[in-house]
């Protein structure tokens, strides 16, 4: 009997010392965001569970104690009182005759649980911290927002995480001062700064406000966020022109796709050849003279312009955003270097044969023309008699000459005789130069 009692006492003592060795492991918290340990100066350690919460009023902590012997036990919870330096009852006996006990919605503090499993009684401890990060300021002063950039002012606070040595009631900071918080400003998914109060340049041009988000991450991976809207003060000029080439008169439509603007200025430049000649002349007349290469300026939102003269032309768009506080902002867009609106050179082509035989192929004599101001066509027979003529002083396109200047091979309603005729074309191009042509025409009627 004495030996049996000794064995039971030894086993109980062995269990007790085993429990003391794994005391901290008997309190867990599956809901915690981070687990760490305190480090007292004398080397004692307590488990610490960190819960990331939204603000300083949230209490998200939870702890679970398990019966270490696997027997139904009674769980008695207490909370450390930092003022008295002692543990005080917390909800008394929470569970009895159970294998585990969980307490929830816990505020910051050191919690202990005494587990009584019949022959074995053990006490375990664990700290709970509700860790928050709050951005207290995030603003863009209007006076700091200019055409070049803008200043963001930001500030934040975070939870004070202090634990106490229960032997001495001395307070220690759980945070590691050598680990700096990670600060990132985002525009959409792009990181634009890692400084708390950055200067952002260049600013984004946008009609709706541009959202910037500050994300702060501390050493325990808890996050604080704040977004703010930037009211853009800068415009962005953008446009397309169509068509980019063709014969005069060339009608070009300019589509304005600019962003965040209040007014526009379209600068239409002279033909590049004219600009070159004016520069050469200015140099010859007076060294260092300035040549104005701009032909005219339009202020309509999306102009449609007809180029009546042949040449190569450039266009520049300037957009303006009105800012009463810091001054107006401008953006300028030129057509890309080497890219021009090409208005084709004047052209007159006289075919030398046509076959008005009714087969639908080459039945009419058509003078091909391009980019003309005016043209006169006269066709003569071999004896110098005029058989067809056409004249116009404001030709808007080559389609007009095709429609009106054709000769169908008839004279006074009767079929002209096969043979050789002579055509004379007197034309003035949109560049002001004469484009005169003349030559023989062979009229055939037989069908192949």
Image (cartoon, rainbow, N blue to C red):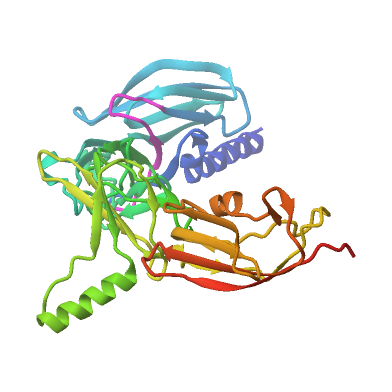
Q: Position of residue 390 (x, y in %)?
A: 53, 54
The answer to which quarter of the image holds residue 222 is top left
Q: Position of residue 184 (x, y in %)?
A: 33, 50
Q: Is residue 66 above or below residue 337?
A: above
Residue 44 is one of the magenta-drawn residues:
yes
Which residue lies most toward the right here? 448
Q: Position of residue 112 (x, y in %)?
A: 39, 30
Q: Position of residue 300 (x, y in %)?
A: 29, 41
- What residue lies at 40% left-to-right and 22% top-to-bottom? 105
Q: Is residue 111 above or below residue 37?
A: above
Point out the stretch of residues depicted in magenta.
41-60
> Is 231 on the left or on the right of 2, as rendered?
left
Residue 402 is one of the magenta-drawn residues:
no
> Is 282 on the left or on the right of 135, as rendered?
left
- What residue lies at 20% left-to-right and 27% top-to-bottom? 84
- What residue lies at 46% left-to-right and 51% top-to-bottom? 396
Specify the quadrant that holds the N terminus: top right
Depth check, front residue: 148 or 137: 148
| Residue 411 visible here | yes
| Residue 201 visible here | no
> Is 204 on the left or on the right of 61, as rendered?
left
Majority secondary structure in the magenta region: loop
Q: Is residue 276 above or below residue 176?
A: below
Depth check, front residue: 304 or 406: 406
Depth check, front residue: 404 or 158: 404
Specify the quadrant that holds the C terminus: bottom right
Depth check, front residue: 442 or 217: 442
């Amino acid at each position: 009997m004495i030996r049996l009692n000794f064995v039971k006492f030894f086993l109980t003592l062995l269990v007790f010392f085993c429990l003391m060795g794994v005391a901290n492991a008997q309190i867990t918290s599956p809901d915690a965001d981070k687990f760490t340990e305190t480090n007292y100066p004398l080397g004692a350690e307590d488990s610490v569970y960190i819960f990331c919460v939204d603000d300083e009023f949230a209490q998200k902590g939870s702890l679970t104690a398990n019966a270490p012997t696997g027997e139904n036990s009674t769980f008695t919870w207490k909370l450390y009182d930092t003022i008295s330096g002692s543990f005080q009852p917390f909800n008394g006996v929470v569970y009895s005759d159970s294998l585990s006990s969980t307490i929830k919605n816990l505020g910051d503090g050191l919690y202990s649980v005494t587990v009584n499993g019949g022959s074995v009684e053990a006490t375990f401890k664990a700290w709970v911290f509700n860790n928050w990060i709050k951005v207290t300021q995030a603003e863009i002063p209007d006076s700091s927002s200019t055409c070049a950039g803008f200043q963001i002012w930001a500030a934040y606070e975070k939870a004070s995480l202090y634990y106490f040595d229960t032997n001495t009631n001395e307070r220690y900071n759980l945070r590691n001062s050598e680990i700096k918080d990670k600060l990132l400003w985002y525009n959409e998914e792009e990181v634009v700064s890692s400084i708390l109060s950055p200067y952002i340049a260049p600013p984004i041009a946008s009609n709706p406000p541009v959202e910037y988000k500050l994300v702060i991450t501390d050493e325990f991976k808890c996050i604080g966020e704040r977004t703010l809207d930037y009211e853009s003060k800068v415009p962005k000029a953008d446009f397309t022109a169509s068509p980019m080439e063709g014969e005069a008169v060339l009608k070009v439509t300019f589509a304005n796709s600019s962003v965040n603007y209040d007014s526009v200025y379209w600068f239409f430049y002279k033909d590049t050849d004219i600009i070159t000649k004016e520069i050469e002349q200015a140099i010859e007349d007076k060294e260092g003279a300035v040549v104005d290469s701009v032909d005219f300026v339009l202020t309509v939102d999306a102009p449609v312009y007809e180029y009546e003269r042949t040449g190569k032309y450039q266009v520049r768009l300037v957009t303006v955003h009105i800012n009463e506080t810091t001054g107006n902002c401008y953006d300028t867009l030129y057509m890309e270097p080497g890219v021009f609106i090409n208005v084709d050179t004047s052209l007159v082509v006289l075919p030398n044969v046509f076959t008005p035989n009714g087969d639908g192929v080459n039945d009419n004599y058509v003078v091909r023309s391009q980019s003309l101001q005016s043209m006169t066509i006269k066709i003569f027979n071999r004896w110098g008699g005029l058989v067809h003529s056409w004249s116009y002083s404001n030709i808007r396109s080559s389609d007009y000459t095709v429609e009106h200047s054709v000769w169908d091979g008839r004279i006074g309603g009767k079929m002209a005789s096969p043979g050789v005729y002579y055509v004379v074309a007197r034309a003035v191009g949109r560049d002001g130069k004469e484009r005169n042509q003349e030559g023989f025409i062979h009229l055939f009627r037989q069908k192949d």
